[in-house]
Image (tube, helix red, strand yellow):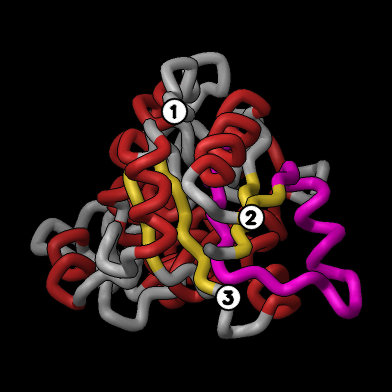
Amino acid sequence: MAEVLVIDDGEVGRLGRCAALERAGHRPAAMGWEEAGRLATETGAKRFDLVMAACRPNPTSWDRYPVVATLTDARRALGTRTRIVALLWGSAIDNPLLGRRLAVAGVNRVVDAAEACCGERLDRMVTDRRIGRDPEPTAHELSLLGVGANTDPDAMISWVMANLADPGRAQAYRNAFEAGFAQNTCGLSRRQAYSLRLNLTRVGHIHAGANRAAGGPVRAPELPRWGDVVAITNIARGLDASSERSAQPVEDHARLCVA
């Protein structure tokens, strides 16, 4: 028997998993992410053996995974003995930069949410530490993406979010990461565009490819191409239409068996 905390903003998935875990002999508790955020700030928070966190992408947020910050706080509040398993939808589980963010936040394992579809599988997720995989990407996986082993996707997101907080230039920075805009049409000045490429390259440890001489109105051959920087930053923030569709709560676990 294990004390399990289920975090999910999808009510069907949250209550269904709790019922399945209870029938399997565990003692589950459930809450949404807002409540989990408050739990993280409480002193003397209840201890759990495992946290099962449904990390759905938020399509209304520039950073599709703002829940990562809540996981960081929860890890701090619950201590290192509590194992944290993150449920991910669609291709998010294969996103190495999201994996790095989750690993830094203290997540022990990531599991495809499709695997959490019945009581038997949920029970195995609690009792068998081999279910799922370590979220931390390998250096080879990061290299294939075009970033170094010391990449810091959280720092990349923080840098952009700081600029999005300025009403006078927020829209131009939003445009920079949209497919319909180029470096010279997004609304950033040349200096701002260069600063974006420079800063995101540094904190993201983005590699400059063989075609790095390109770059639009700001020629900086020592830096990666504008398109590469934008693409990798979009991966870091978890932009993935297919994962967003598959994670919609209306679809989630309508077939969840609790028997």
Q: CA distance from mark 1 to mark 3?
A: 27 Å
Q: CA distance from mark 2 to mark 1?
A: 16 Å
Work out whether mark 2 precedes mark 3 in sequence or the reverse, and give the earlier one: 2
Q: x, y percentage for residue 47?
A: 71, 73
What residue is rendered at 89% in x and 71% in y?
42
Q: Which residue is mark 2?
A: 27
Number of other residues with Cα within 10 Å of mark 3, as a class: few under 14, some 14 to 19, many 20 or more = many
Which one is nearer the viewer's eye here, 66 or 53? Answer: 53
Q: Amino acid at mark 3?
A: Thr
Q: Which residue is mark 3?
A: 82
Q: Amino acid at mark 2?
A: Arg
Q: x, y percentage for residue 195?
A: 53, 64
Q: Quadrant of the C terminus?
A: top left
Q: Which numbered disc covers residue 259?
A: 1
Q: x, y percentage for residue 139?
A: 19, 77
What residue is rendered at 38% in x and 32% in y?
117
Q: Which residues are magenta?
A: 30-58
Q: x, y percentage for residue 161?
A: 67, 55
Q: Are marks 2 and 1 in contact (CB under 8 Å)?
A: no
Q: Secondary structure at mark 1?
A: loop
On whether residue 47 falls in the magenta region, the answer is yes
